[in-house]
Image (tube, rainbow, N blue to C red):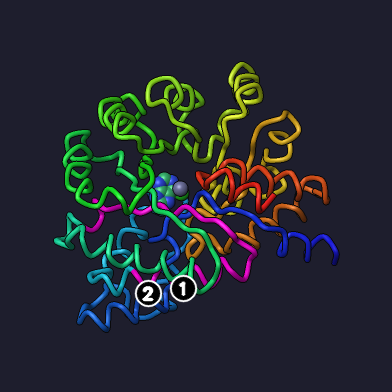
Amino acid sequence: SRLMSFLREMPKAELHIHIEGSLEPELIFALAERNGMRLVYPDVQTLKAGYAFKDLQSFLDIYYAGASVLRTAQDFEDMAWAYFLRAKADGVVRTELFFDPQTHTSRGVPLKACFAGLREACRRARTKLGISADLILCFLRHLSEEDAMSTLDDALAFRNDFIGIGLDSSEKGNPPEKFARVYARCRELGLRLVAHAGEEGPADYIESALDVLKVERIDHGVQSIHSPALMLRLSQTKIPLTVCPLSNVKLCVFRDLADHPLAQMLDAGLCVTINSDDPAYFGGYLLDNYVQTFRALNLGMEHAYQLARNSLLASFASDSDKQHWI
Ligand code: ES4
Ligand code: ZN
């Protein structure tokens, strides 16, 4: 239909994609073989059968197992390149990739391998696909602030290879306050700041991400619907929210897409964007997220335009690039 073609062809940004979450089962097995590793899952079907999650933690356990096959710069480049091809097909013109260095350094993979592979894939995305791509380094919130701080120290050797920092992994029990000092330091370094907040954790975590960490965007933020005062603040400040509808359903944040508050949030004037989060695990890339959400919530052209425009405005691309796309 006209709406579906519009959803594909309109220029849009993807602002919430964990590149390790784009690792398809087939590529997991190919990389394991290339690296002479044996997975605890005998084959692709058995691995895929494990993709039934009850909450964020049950997903994270499998996601870290999948990421364990990444060892060399080439592995990181191949993973990101596969994502860029999918993004191109979905009409993505700008993407900001999250990656989790601590997941790799803790296994003995040098930080240099992550950066070299991801940097090269981003460069090829620009030159071969016309996609503007940058990296956002995420700290794992289940680890200590000291661990985040030393990861930052090491990453500063690659300061020109990433534009900002984020905060991901297990949200409950790991409030934003735990990372106040590392965010303050990143702010002084001129890094862009985002954080996951209000996915499974309370609306309070969204407020402290804004007030204590001073983030410029909130990743997820869907628990804001439980706080009218916060909804008002988000509508007035236009702080962007990178919402991930298929992820929220797969991780049982909402029962199904028809129950998702995205339309309610848009109608309240929030700067909502649609994103895929971990597309290889949650059943769809960016366009799938748009199409399924539009079907379930009966959204139309006006919503499509608003969501694509929000995504470009909320991106950390240059003002001249934004003007060019919008
Ligand atoms: C994640 Cl869905 C989600 N939430 C928090 N951390 C993550 N890391 C990868 N996907
Ligand atoms: Zn996420």
Residue 111 seen: yes
Q: Residue furthest front?
A: 320
Seen in the image, is 314 located left or right of residue 211?
right
Q: In this picture, which residue range is highlighted in magenta?
A: 77-104
The three-letter code of the residue at mark 2 reads Asp
The structure residue drawn at horizontal position 48% and vertical position 22%, both measured from the top left corner, is 207
> What's the residue type where badge 1 is placed?
Ala
Q: Nearer the viewer, residue 57 or 103?
A: 103
> Dot 1 corresponds to which residue?
82
**Which secondary structure, mark 1?**
helix
Report x, y in % for residue 214: 42, 25
Q: CA distance from mark 2 to mark 1?
A: 6 Å
Point 56% across, 66% down: residue: 87
Residue nearest the viewer, comparing 120 with 324:
324
Q: How many marks?
A: 2
| Residue beneath disc 2 | 78
Q: Position of residue 163 (x, y in %)?
A: 38, 46
Mark 1: give few (<14), some (14-19) or many (20+) Cα within 10 Å: some
